[in-house]
Image (spheres, grey):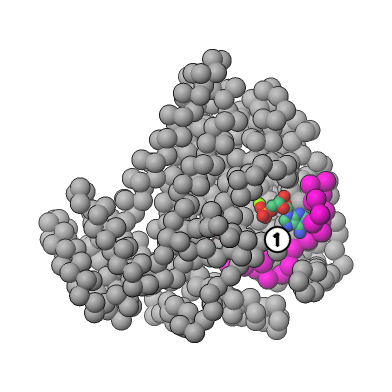
Amino acid sequence: MAVTKAVSETGWNLDNSYARLPATFYTILRPTPVRSPQLVMLNAVLAEFLGLNPVALKEKEGVEVLAGNRIAEGSMPLAQAYAGHQFGHFTMLGDGRAHLLGEQITPRGERYDIQLKGSGKTPYSRHGDGRAALGPMLREYIVSEAMYALGIPTTRSLAVVTTGEPVYRETELPGAVLTRVAASHLRVGTFQYVSKWDTDNLRVLADYTIERHFPDGLNTENRYLFLLQEVIRRQAALIAKWQLVGFVHGVMNTDNMALSGETIDYGPCAFMDSYDPATVFSSIDVYGRYAYGNQPVVAQWNLARFAETLLPLLHSDELQAVRLAQQAVSGFTDLYRSNWLAGMRAKLGIFDEEAEDESLAQSLLDLMRRHRADYTNTFLALTFDNPQYSSLSGTPEFAKWQERWQARLCRQRETRAAREQLMKKNNPALIPRNHRVEEALEAAVQREDVSVMERLLAALADPYAHSPGQVEYAAPPPPSACRYRTFCGT
Ligand code: AMP
Ligand code: MG
C-alpha cells in the first residue's frame, strides 16, 4: 500500500486504498455540505497521534473538512457498501449517512480510516435522511473515548461539528457530524455483501483484509483460515473485555462487528449499573437478543456468519471447508472463556490459576445479581476493602464469600500490596454512568455548555488512576432514577 501524498499544513496525509478495490464495494461520493459548521469538540491528543495539527483543524478550513464542506488534499470520499444480519434478518445496507474520507497515514506509518458520520445521504440511505443529531454524536464521542481509556479496542472520535441545520427525529434537534477514526471499517457485513457477488471479488476483499490487519497470515499455508481464526481470536478477546467492564453494545448486528477487533457503532450502548445478565438498554431490543449476558453467544453467531462467507476460500472441497469453518467457530467458546477468566482473576487480585477460580467468580456474580449490587463498585469495594462501595457488604452471604476469597488469596505467594496493584489496574474507578453522560449531553445540547462534558471526559481519561476527583463519578444513579432506555436510528 504505497503512499505518495505530500503532507499538508493540517497534516492530512491520506491514502485511498479502499477506493482502489473493485467498484462494487463502494460508491465514490462527496459529503453533502452543511449550512454553517461550528466545532463543538476536538480531540487534540488523538489529532496529534494521527499527525494532524489541532490548531489548523480548529481554523475555518479545518472545520470545513470535518463538516464535509471541503475535501482535504488527497481525500477521495466514498460510501462503503455492506450487508448485515439485523436482529437475525439479512439486509443489504451500506453507509447510509457516512463517508470514508480516506486513510490517514500517521508519522509512524500506521493507517487509520477517517470517516464522517452524519455527512449526508448516499445510495445506501434507504429511508434515512443521511444526518445525525448532536446528542448521539457527542454520546459516541464520550463512550468511545471512555472505552479507549479503559483499554478496550475501539474506534475513536476525533471531532464533532454542528451543521447549523436541524434534523427531525421525534422532535427537531441540532444536526452534527462526527469524525470517526478506525483501524478500518471492514465488517462481517462487508464480507456478507461481497460474498453475494463472486469468489474473485471475495478473494480480493479477503486478501485486502489480511494485508491490512493480519499480515502474518500472508505466509501461512491457508491464509483464509488464518484470517478466520484471527478474527475469532480478536472478537473473543474483545467481548471478554466488554463483559469485564459491564458494557452492553446494544446492537450487535453483523454489520456492527469490525474485523479489526475494535468496538464499533455506538448507538444504543450503555454500561450496566447493578449486575444482571438480562440487562438491555435498547428500546427496540424487545426480546433481549443483545442483552449483556447474551453478548458472547451473539458474537459467536456473527462469527459463524463470517465463516460462511469464507467457505469458497477455505478449501476447494466444500465438506472440508465446512469442517474447517466449524472447527474455528466452535473454538470461540474456549477462547472467550479463557480471556474472561484471566480478566476475572485479575479483577479479584489472583495471579496464579486454580480450578475453583471460575466458580469463585461466578458465586460473586450470583450474589451481585440476587442483591442487585452495582457491578463496578462491588469490585471497588473488594479492591479497597471499603464496604461503602457495595450494597453487598454487610450481607452474611457476602461475608462467607469473602472468607473463601481471602483463603484463595492466602494460597498465592504475592504480597497484599501486589494484589492491590493488580486489582487497581483491572477495576476502573469509574465507568461512563448513564446519568452522568445524560447530564453532560443535556448541558451541551440544551445550553450549549460543553464544560460538563469536558469534566466528565477528563475523569474518564484515566479510569485506573483512582484519583479523588473520580469519586463523585463513581456513584450509581439514585434509586429514584427511571430505567435507562437508549434508542437506535439517532
Ligand atoms: P446502525 O444501526 O447505525 O448500524 O445503522 C444501520 C444502517 O442504517 C446503516 O446502513 C446506516 O448507515 C443506516 N442509517 C442509520 N441512520 C441513518 C440516517 N439517519 N440516514 C441514513 N442512513 C442511516
Ligand atoms: Mg452500523
Residue 283 picture quarter: bottom right
Q: Which percent across, then down, holds residue 354?
A: 19, 49
Query: Furthest-front residue in view?
Result: 287
Residue type, label 1: Gly
- Point out the quarter of the image occupied by ligand 1: bottom right
Q: Is residue 377 above or below residue 247?
A: below
| Residues in magenta, as a range | 119-148
Give 141 or 477, whichever is nearer the viewer.
477
* Residue 193 within the segment the image draws in magenta: no
- Mark 1, ligand 1, within 8 Å: the answer is yes
Q: Which residue is mark 1?
A: 489
* Residue sitting at x 54%, y 15%: 317
* Residue sitting at x 26%, y 52%: 358
Q: Is residue 113 above or below residue 449?
A: above
* Residue sitting at x 75%, y 30%: 22
Label 1, residues with CA under 10 Å away: few <14, some 14-19, many ≥20: few
Q: In the rendered view, does 320 fall on the left or right side of 464?
A: right
* Residue sitting at x 28%, y 69%: 383
Tell me the quadrant of the picture where the N terminus can be found.
top right
Q: Which percent across, then down, holds residue 322?
A: 51, 24
Give 343 or 169, whichever is nearer the viewer.
169
Residue 140 picture quarter: bottom right
Q: Which percent across, then down, holds residue 341?
A: 31, 51
Q: Is residue 387 above or below residue 426?
A: below
Q: In the rendered view, does 94 fall on the left or right side of 226?
A: right
Give 336 or 425, whichever is nearer the viewer.
336
